[in-house]
Amino acid sequence: MTNAEYYSFAWVGDFESETELVAHEWAGKEQSVLDSILKHCDEENNVESRPQQVLESGKPVVIQNILQESTDEPWRKMALTNGFHSVACFPLTDRNHHYGFFEVYGEKPGLFADEEVAVLEELAAHIGNAISAVQRKEALLSGHSISLEFEIESPDDPLFELAATADCSLTVEALAPHRDDSWLVYVALEAENPDSVLETARESTHITDANLVDSSGGAALLALVASTLTVPSVISNHGGSVQSLVVRPKGGSLSVTLSDSTDVRSFVEACTKELPHLELIRRTAVPKQAVSGLQYEIANLVTEKQLQALHTAYLEGYFEWPRTKTGEEIAASLGVSGPTFQQHIRKGTNRIFQNTFGPDSKERLDE
């Protein structure tokens, strides 16, 4: 970014506490400039810093002309001394979870016009989403993670309503965000008449699509598109990953994985505030060895969307012979175009094959 014309310095930071500001990355100037910025943001000079304003409001803060607009005299002097004449600060968030901010300094006044701010806001959204995805993957597949087990009494959630109405138990096999903030969810059930459960699902006002994927082996697998899923949404919004969810007619059980850096108490308090009948039963530290090496490799080779496409294709019988679902049908269930689905599948499988059959594969297999 700092290679672009007029952008002279950029940095990413966050507050480790209410008063302690830390920098994670920076570019464009030597560290002494960053140290000066941190010093002036930390000083008590009765002027709220831009990072503080951004994290409190969740909105960008833009100063088009530091000389004329800034009321923070020490910071203004420091900025002008380093050749800064404009600045914009943006929050890094994803699904109401905050990951700090990034701030960009410009060499001339008026650099951050509306169009420029819109582009940088979109960049901030992508950064927040990427940080969230990395943390979720780390929670699942790297280092040590934390496993939390909950019991929950019938919340206002379409899956729990379905289980109660159809008088059956549902085991969630897979979850994936769908278009328009809806969810694609695969549920397994043991029922004498899965068609009856399917019909009940289709009558639900919150389930917009329901299909029977498989009914062999004494169990049935349903694919549902729900306009909202309260429980997974709350867990995801606060940085957790749902590992298992069993829904019964009068409640259910839930297993959640967090990265080991997560404040468990804050996470539980935030979730129970939105899900009052959520009760923490057990907390367990999960070592890296608990995840199979193959699982670890695949999830680190492919992107989140590629993994989602591969997982859904597997559940829908795309890799069976003969195929039980076409690529177009699975793409529709994921809410993406056929070419996009094929691109995810081809790129994902290609990365896995390269890792398995490429020039370095024998050395890895011999280890």
Image (cartoon, rainbow, N blue to C red):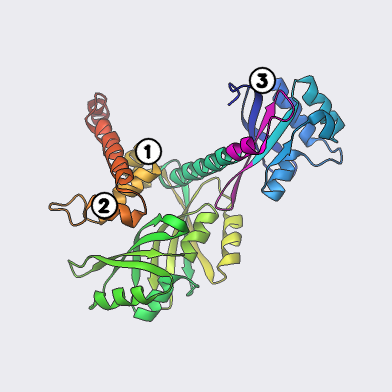
In front: label 2 or label 3: 2
Q: Residues within 10 Å of mark 3 (few under 14, many from 20)?
A: some
Give the position of the C terminus as an image quadrant.
top left
Which residue carries the number 1 mark? 300
How many angstroms separate mark 1 from mark 3 (CA)?
33 Å
Which residue carries the number 3 mark? 29
- For mark 2, give the secondary structure: helix
User: Going 74% across and 24% down the picture, which residue do you hit?
Assistant: 84
The segment highlighted magenta reads: 91-120
User: Going 38% across and 40% down the picture, which residue do you hit?
Assistant: 303
The part of the image, by quadrant, that contains residue 25 is: top right
Q: Position of residue 232 (x, y in %)?
A: 46, 61
Q: Position of residue 8 (x, y in %)?
A: 66, 22
Q: Could you tell me how many numbered marks the image carries?
A: 3
- Residue 328 higher or lower than 70, as above or below: below
Amino acid type, callout 3:
Lys
Amino acid type, callout 2:
Glu
Point out the tag, 1 or 3, that comes first from the N-terminus.
Answer: 3
- Position of residue 79 in the picture relative to residue 26 (left or right): right
- Residue 124 higher or lower than 285, as above or below: above
- For mark 1, give the secondary structure: helix
Can residue 172 be seen by looking at this rendering? yes
The part of the image, by quadrant, that contains residue 273 is: bottom right
Point out the tag, 2 or 3, that comes first from the N-terminus.
Answer: 3
Which residue carries the number 2 mark? 328
- Residue 253 higher or lower than 9, as above or below: below
- Taking the magenta stretch, the answer to whether it contains residue 97 is yes
Q: Position of residue 262 (x, y in %)?
A: 56, 49
